[in-house]
Amino acid sequence: MKKCIVQYWIPSSDYTDPEYNNLLQEKDQHRLVELSTKSFERYANKYGHDFKRISEKKIDFKHPTFERFDLWLDDSWWEEYDEIMYVDCDVFAMPDAPDIFENYKSLDSFKVCNHPAFQLATEPDHIDNIYHGLLKKCKLDEVKWYGFQPGVFILTKHAKDIMKPYIEQFKALDDHDGHILIWACIKSKVPLTRMSEYYNYKKAHLKGHPEIYFFHAAGHKKLKEQDRITTFLKEKGIK
């Protein structure tokens, strides 16, 4: 079966909580979103995968960030695909990035990138940053193992089936979508594949960092460091 890469880009103003979780409004990031989309269209074409950018809401809950739960809730996705990679609209595929589906072939697991903020958390302040809200209902060791940054992940049909009963509860869970995803992993005990953090790397535009595969211009750095980010992307051929 085919693989698919999916992004969601829907105006937050169409939702009841457009400033949810301190996320940027679409007017502040339109140019970078277009560059992100172009980079993944090229990436998908290069390796023979489908690419879809979703622009119409289906979940219609609080904020567009929840729309990705549709990948679990709408079984029609899985009539055509056995794997779907979700990527945020501020993630950029480097022109030489290898095929992530080829590098991680398992169809029996949920695939996420290593995230040292979770896996290497040892100091009390580091633990406080990852262990709160809904995740406090789980064991710390489970949070550290399953924890990931949800800007990039690969969902397989098998993992979808295991996690779906927990994702279905999202409207009743008083926490943000990232915590809900981690909580659903822990509660469902879905098998996990840990991918290289180079597929979800946040500081590639700064000096001294390695050659990576996907650059994630996460959070408000998109505004604070926009010139540096666009210069970095242009140097990599993303323009």
Image (cartoon, rainbow, N blue to C red):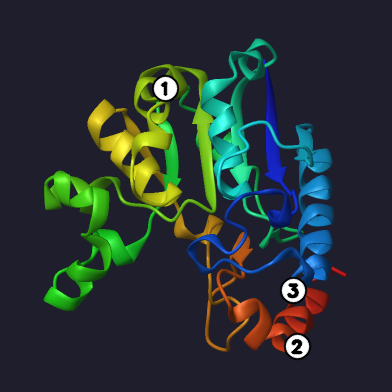
Residue ranking furthest to the right: 239
Query: Does residue 189 appear in this view?
Result: no
How many other residues sit within 10 Å of disc 3, few (<14), some (14-19) or many (≥20)? few
How many other residues sit within 10 Å of disc 1, few (<14), some (14-19) or many (≥20)? some
Q: Nearer the viewer, residue 91 or 176?
A: 176
CA distance for labels 2 and 3: 13 Å
Of the residues under marks 1 and 2, which one precedes in the sequence? 1
**Residue 231 x, y percent position in the rendering:** 78, 84
**Residue 134 x, y percent position in the rendering:** 25, 48
What label sits on residue 28 in the rendered view?
A: 3
Of the residues under marks 3 and 1, which one precedes in the sequence? 3
Residue type of the residue flagged with mark 3: Asp
Q: Which residue is mark 2?
A: 227
Of the residues under marks 2 and 3, which one precedes in the sequence? 3
Query: Does residue 98 appear in this view?
Result: yes
**Residue 10 x, y percent position in the rendering:** 74, 48
Location of residue 227 with respect to 27 vertically, above or below = below
Label 1 element class: helix
Q: Residue at x 42, y 36 (%)?
A: 171
**Circle nearer the viewer, 1 or 2:** 1
Q: Which residue is mark 1?
A: 164
Residue 47 left/right relative to 159? right
Q: Residue at x 33, y 34 (%)?
A: 184
